[in-house]
Image (cartoon, rainbow, N blue to C red):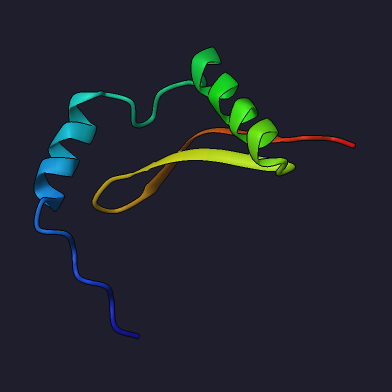
Amino acid sequence: MKSAPLPIDEELRIADLLSYDILDSEREKDFDQLVELASQITHCPVAMMSFIDRKRQWLKASIQMRE
């Protein structure tokens, strides 16, 4: 399978991401509230926020609404 080409500003995106020092951090109330709001606005039972560095995807917040 052929991979999609990286954007021309990928190194800038990675540098910005790393400058936030958010990867491998604990859960935070603000991020939890953002995914809850996204779930409510979109009427989706599941919402997640993740950050992608060069080698992995870091799941920062997630919610699964119960019926």
From the viewer's perspective, tell me whether residue 62 is left or right of residue 66. Answer: left
Q: What residue appears at the point 26 percent right and 73 percent down from the top-left corner?
A: 4
Above or below residue 8? Residue 60 is: above
Q: What residue appears at the point 59 percent right and 33 percent down from the top-left corner?
A: 38
Q: Quadrant of residue 63?
A: top right
From the viewer's perspective, tell me whether residue 63 is left or right of residue 61. Answer: right
Question: Residue 6: horizontal and vertical position, in percent?
Answer: 18, 63
Question: Residue 64: horizontal and vertical position, in percent?
Answer: 73, 37
Q: What residue appears at the point 10 percent right and 42 percent down from the top-left corner?
A: 12
Q: Residue furthest bottom?
A: 1
Question: Residue 33: horizontal and vertical position, in percent?
Answer: 58, 20
Front position in the image: 18 or 65: 65
Which quadrant is the C terminus positioned in?
A: top right
Q: Quadrant of residue 20?
A: top left
From the viewer's perspective, tell me whether residue 58 is left or right of residue 30. Answer: left
Front position in the image: 45 or 41: 41
Q: Quadrant of residue 1?
A: bottom left
Q: Residue furthest top?
A: 29
